[in-house]
Amino acid sequence: MFKNVEIYSKSNCFFCDKAKKYFSQNDIFFVEHNVEIADVFDTLMSRNPNARTMPQIFINDVLIGGYTDLIEWLEK
């Protein structure tokens, strides 16, 4: 289920921290990408041009969305 988890995040982001905490507490490895770095931001925009909030979470290369989207996805 969680083979490849990526979180696009930024500093001082409450929901970014909640998402990372969820994965950490459940021993799920994830890669964090800091969108405050221009190249990382550009990569995110190419993967999800509609991204307007942080975090943006991808699991197995599928866009899940933000933290609340993650919780809804997990409940399914």
Image (tube, rainbow, N blue to C red):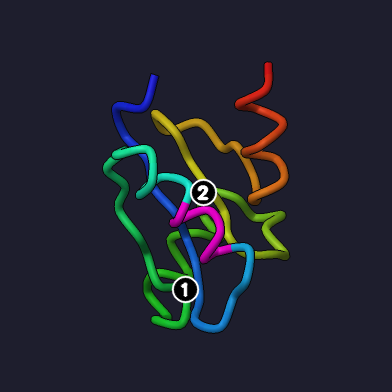
In the image, what residue type sits under mark 1?
Val
* Tag 1–tag 2 contact (CB < 8 Å): no
Residue situated in front as seen by the camera: 65 or 49: 65
Count how many numbered circles sit on residues in the image: 2
Label 2: state its secondary structure: helix
Name the residue at 51% across, 55% down: 46
| Residue neighbourhood size for the residue with mark 1, other residues' Cα within 10 Å, grouped as few (<14), some (14–19), many (≥20) | many
Is residue 35 shown above or below 20?
below
Residue 76 pos. (x, y %) = 68, 16
Estimate the x, y position of residue 1 in percent, counting from the top left: 39, 18
Where is residue 20, by image quadrant? bottom left
Label 2 amino acid? Answer: Arg
Q: Nearer the viewer, residue 60 or 73?
A: 73
Q: Give the residue at mark 2.
A: 47
Secondary structure type for disc 1 = loop
Snapshot quadrant of residue 75 = top right
Per the picture, the main secondary structure of the magenta-coloured stretch is: helix
| 10 left or right, relative to 50 | left
Residue interval drawn in magenta:
16-21
Residue 33 picture quarter: bottom left
> Residue 60 colored magenta?
no
Question: Which of the two marks, 1 or 2, is nearer to us in this view?
Answer: 1
On residue 74, the disc is: none
Q: Nearer the viewer, residue 51 or 14?
A: 14
Residue at x 39%, y 28% (from the top left corner): 60
Measured from the top left, where is residue 12 in percent x and y? Answer: 56, 83
Q: In this view, does 2 lie to the left or right of 50?
A: left
User: Where in the figure is residue 37, as x and y percent of width and height?
Assistant: 39, 81
Q: Which mark is residue 35?
A: 1
